[in-house]
Amino acid sequence: MVSTQSADIHQDSITQASPNQNILPLSAQIGEEEQLKVGGCDVTELVAQYGSPLYIVDEQTIRAACQQYRQSFQRYYPGPSQVLYASKAWSCVAICALVASEGLGLDVVSGGELYTALQAGVDPTTIYFHGNNKSIAELEMALASDCTIIADNWLELEQLVELIADSEQTSPRVMLRMTPGIECHTHEYIRTGHLDSKFGFDPNQVDQVLTFAKQHPEINWVGFHAHIGSQIFELQPHQDLTSVIVSWLVKAKTLGLPMDELNIGGGLGIRYVESDDPPSIEKWSEVVCKGIFNACQSAQLPLPKLFCEPGRSLIGPACITAYTVGAQKSIPDIRTYLSVDGGMSDNPRPITYQSVYSAAIANRMNTAPTEVVTVAGKHCESGDVLLKDVTLPPSQPNDILVIMGTGAYNYSMASNYNRLPRPAAILVHNGDASLILRRETYQDLVRQDCLPRQLEQHLH
């Protein structure tokens, strides 16, 4: 695992304008007693009230990211645009409702995410349904909800045609996902734009796909989608994508297909550690918007409606996870393990992607970091390590350790490994804390369990 950098957090390091360039949420402050505050709430007091591990989500940071995306697209793109939240990063009713209140639509990748978005009151005409292996039930649900379907493969196209023929559905909106064949420097598991990807139609098949679309006018073929990956710091791959995706629109126009939407995905990275240097939301948006504009001008095309799908850069920096420190184990000349009351069940990214984070002791924010420790989770896995060789202030049992930048894919990928209940989540703003996810109980863990009759006697 890559060594995690220490979180050298000071008051002047939490004031940058673009949320994705911040390690801490925008509202973070250090109180008079060197305690960390987020959204005007004392983190240690939140843990005392709600327990730990605890996801603490800053409303100000989410709203700022939503607004920066919307305003940047309006500033740099003279045509119509729509920002979608990639809800796979964190899908729950409250988060979906929050981003929708800022004028964002949603992209979803399963029936469960679609159901959650609808329960949150999101306008279905602003929902875009992704997925490389949608079930028939999910396709039927998408058609019934009137959301836009992003078709990923030939089987899905054939199933859509059959479903529409057997129903009273008229002109469902369908967007085509293509693989752009663009490489970028990110983890192998989260690169989706290169040719060897499970997502989307091969770019060499664009003529065949468009011919199929031309043969099925009962479907409203609205445009193209492409996505090159996640946690990307480079701007050039997104610049390259704009000309590629516009070239597909040109082909569609030559066939008489009235497509007028382009979705360039997301993928903007965030700052997990001090050495990370992602471009700002505004700069990324400027490159994308100007790239599409210039490509359309060169091709003499009217400007399509332009979509983007931020996930990590919108929700990631908004959350910190608070843990209670427990046992320590010092191995002379090797390392010191500092154990916390969570781990891979609430944040599987380090063991899955070798992801790195920054950390701090929430009740010792101004104490000098002088001890190198490895923060270990409580699960029965040697690899359950959240941070390796991070420099922190001297800590004691019951101190509160926080890990920053945990809004993206932590709750979404959380599990009940070792039968640990998943944590609670709260939304903080202006000194108020609101519960958005209840902490699971032991009763929740066995709620779906079924006991065969022949085993019932062993309960008594």
Image (cartoon, rainbow, N blue to C red):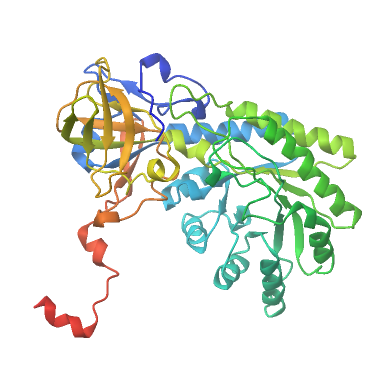
Direction from residue 438 to residue 457 in the image, left or right: left
User: Which of these two is toward me, 89 or 133?
Assistant: 133
Report x, y in % for residue 85. Answer: 55, 45
Direction from residue 287 to residue 369 in the image, left or right: left
Q: Quadrant of residue 448?
A: bottom left
Q: Is residue 35 above or below residue 84?
A: above
Q: Is residue 48 above or below residue 197?
A: above
Report x, y in % for residue 115. Answer: 49, 61
User: Which of these two is toward me, 389 or 117?
Assistant: 389
Quadrant holding the N terminus: top left
Identify which residue is drawn at 36% across, 25% down. Answer: 28
Identify which residue is drawn at 12% across, 78% down. Answer: 458
User: Which of these two is toward me, 251 or 39?
Assistant: 251
Identify which residue is drawn at 25% across, 57% down. Answer: 419
Q: Quadrant of residue 324?
A: top left
The reply to whether residue 78 is visible in this rendering is: no
